[in-house]
Image (cartoon, rainbow, N blue to C red):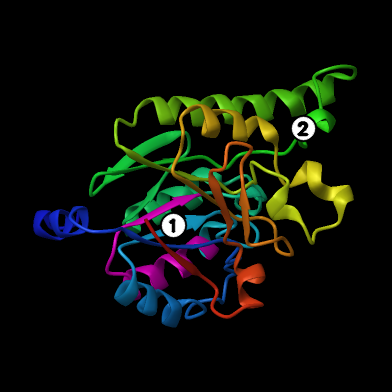
Amino acid sequence: MMPVSFLKAMAKRALRIAATADLHYAKHSRGKMQEAFAEISQSADVLLLCGDLTEYGLAEEAVELAADIRSSMRIPCIGVIGNHDYESGQPDAVAKILDETGVTMLNGEAVEIAGVGFAGICGFGGGFGRRMLNAWGEPLIKEFVQESISHAIRLEQALVKLQTERRIVVLHYSPIRATLQGEDPEIYPFLGSSRLEEPINRFKVTTVFHGHAHNGALDGTTSTGIPVYNVSAPALHKSGKPYRIVEL
């Protein structure tokens, strides 16, 4: 837990949020982000980890990431899991290891830090706008759509809990099409869903951070003008460091 004096100092000025995603830690990745984490600790107030934290969703991979976080991070960390973290059927184990390291892992929950609220969930696919997949036809299609709806509902439930003026949403999947520009259009439905955008707009969220789009654009806005940042490390690497800092 951060000292009260530290949190009060943060609340009196703009909050510097560092964010990254798609770190894909494997069994021998220790040290991969250690230098970046140390830099972030010196230049930001909060770090957001926007999913795909491991390569195959193995507990051993999460242990590697946890070791780097434990040795280098000196600021609060908030995270969500991504699709890779589900791969081995151990998403809860991955989240638990990181949570025990001090990362607040959100899965449809909310947390407040220094007067700023954070709501987080992985999110899911389904497509965008008029081409969004609907629950019609085969049972498997209906199950897919229901999963997408479930993540949107749980995001809404997390936002309901926040009474702060500034509200940040942390996702893995994108809520808008704009930050997917650069990816093959054929895979857009598997990279995000407009269903996530609806509660973001309705609750007038301040900013959204997501990952997953390795080749996507870094900036976009929702239909009501809310800033959305794609912080996938592979996308960010093209312009410099594997993380981004946004001041709010």
Q: Residue at x 86, y 56 (%)?
A: 184
Please state the horizontal and vertical placement of residue 50, each as a whole percent of the image. Answer: 53, 54
Name the one closer to the observer, 171 or 146. 171
Q: Assign the C terminus to one quadrant of the image.
A: bottom left
The residue wearing badge 1 is 48
Badge 1 density bin: few <14, some 14–19, many ≥20, Cα 10 Å: many
Q: Residue 199 at what x, y percent from top left?
A: 54, 28
Q: Within the image, what quadrant is residue 162 found in?
A: top left
Residue 153 shows in this picture: yes
Indicate the position of residue 243 as horizontal and vertical percent values: 51, 70
Q: What numbered label is drawn on residue 234?
A: none
Residue in the picture at 58% in, 80% down: 240
Question: Does 34 lie within the magenta span?
Answer: no
The residue sitting at 11% across, 54% down in the picture is: 4
Residue that carries the numbered disc 2 in the rendered image: 129
Front one among 24 and 209: 209
In the rendered view of the protein, which quadrant contains the N terminus?
A: bottom left
Q: Amino acid at mark 2?
A: Gly
The residue range painted magenta reads 61-80
For the residues labelled 2 and 1, the Cα–Cα distance comes to: 27 Å
Percent position of residue 36, x then y? 44, 78
Q: Residues within 10 Å of mark 2 (few under 14, many from 20)?
A: few
Q: Nearer the viewer, mark 2 or mark 1?
A: 2
For marks 2 and 1, the one nearer the N-term is 1
Please state which amino acid type lies under the numbered disc 1: Leu
